[in-house]
């Protein structure tokens, strides 16, 4: 395996690659609740939005984007402003190589540096790879929303996990 480069996502450069990585998850799995595959224009907008206040990182190997991870606002009410919802997607065939751990780990460090204090993630269950990644990075289960999504001909549950960012428990500035 060649060296992995983790860098900030750039909408004009990475939108199509991220869209290509995401498309099979929309089309062939229940991992995401989107039912229409977003195009590169939509991904460029998503990257730019995330970069404004959070982060969008890509993992590149041999010049090819092989994964991306991002943080966005958890909820819109002001009291939630120090929490962030995080997500990660890897190109098919790149699972199980430690790539997700490195990419997500870097994202969590970046979000901590930006002042976020809690990361949350939702995942369709069962999803052993995603559940294992979150567990390995210190996320703890906080609940399951039962039958909240209909995809691929059946109701789907979403498990929620969270993880503190940083050690600071003092009131935010």
Image (cartoon, helix red, strand yellow):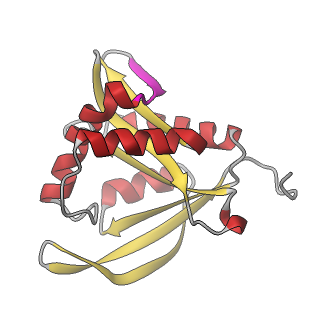
Please tell me in which quadrant of the rendered image residue 59 appears: top left
Report the number of discs: 0
Which residue is found at the position 21% from the left and 53% from the top?
25
Instruction: Report if residue 90 is visible in the image.
Output: no
User: Compared to 135, does 17 lie above or below?
Assistant: above
Q: Nearer the viewer, residue 88 or 39?
A: 39
User: Is residue 154 visible in the rendered structure shown here?
Assistant: yes
Q: Dominant secondary structure of the magenta stretch?
A: strand
Q: Which residues are magenta?
A: 4-10
Out of 153 and 13, give the one closest to the viewer: 13
Residue 14's place in the image compared with 147, above or below, is: above
Where does the image place residue 67, in percent across and percent down from the top left?
Answer: 33, 36
Q: Does 77 sit left or right of 147 as displayed?
A: right
Image side of residue 81 versus residue 3, left or right: right
Q: Is residue 20 magenta?
A: no
* Residue drawn at point x = 32 percent, y = 60 percent: 128
Name the image quarter holding the N terminus.
top left
Residue 23 lies, with reference to residue 126, above or below; the image says above
Could you tell me residue 69's position as x and y percent?
Answer: 43, 42
Q: Quadrant of residue 94?
A: top left
Residue in the picture at 22% in, 65% down: 30
Q: With 77 as the anchor, is 42 left or right in this view? A: left
Q: Position of residue 101 (x, y in %)?
A: 45, 40
Vertical arrangement, residue 29 with respect to residue 60, above or below: below
């Amino acid at each position: 395996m060649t060296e992995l480069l983790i860098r900030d996502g750039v909408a004009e450069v990475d939108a199509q690659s991220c869209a290509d990585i995401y498309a099979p998850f929309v089309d062939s799995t229940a991992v995401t609740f989107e039912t229409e595959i977003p195009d590169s224009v939509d991904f460029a907008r998503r990257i730019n939005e995330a970069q404004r206040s959070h982060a969008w990182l890509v993992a590149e190997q041999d010049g090819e984007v092989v994964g991306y991870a991002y943080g966005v606002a958890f909820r819109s009410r002001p009291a939630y402003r120090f929490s962030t919802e995080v997500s990660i997607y890897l190109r098919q065939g790149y699972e199980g190589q430690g790539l997700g751990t490195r990419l997500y780990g870097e994202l969590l460090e970046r979000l901590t540096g930006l002042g976020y204090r809690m990361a949350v993630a939702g995942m369709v269950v069962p999803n052993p790879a995603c559940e294992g990644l979150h567990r390995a990075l210190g996320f703890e289960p906080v609940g399951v929303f039962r039958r909240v999504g209909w995809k691929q001909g059946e109701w789907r549950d979403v498990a929620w996990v969270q993880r503190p960012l940083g050690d600071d428990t003092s009131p935010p500035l």
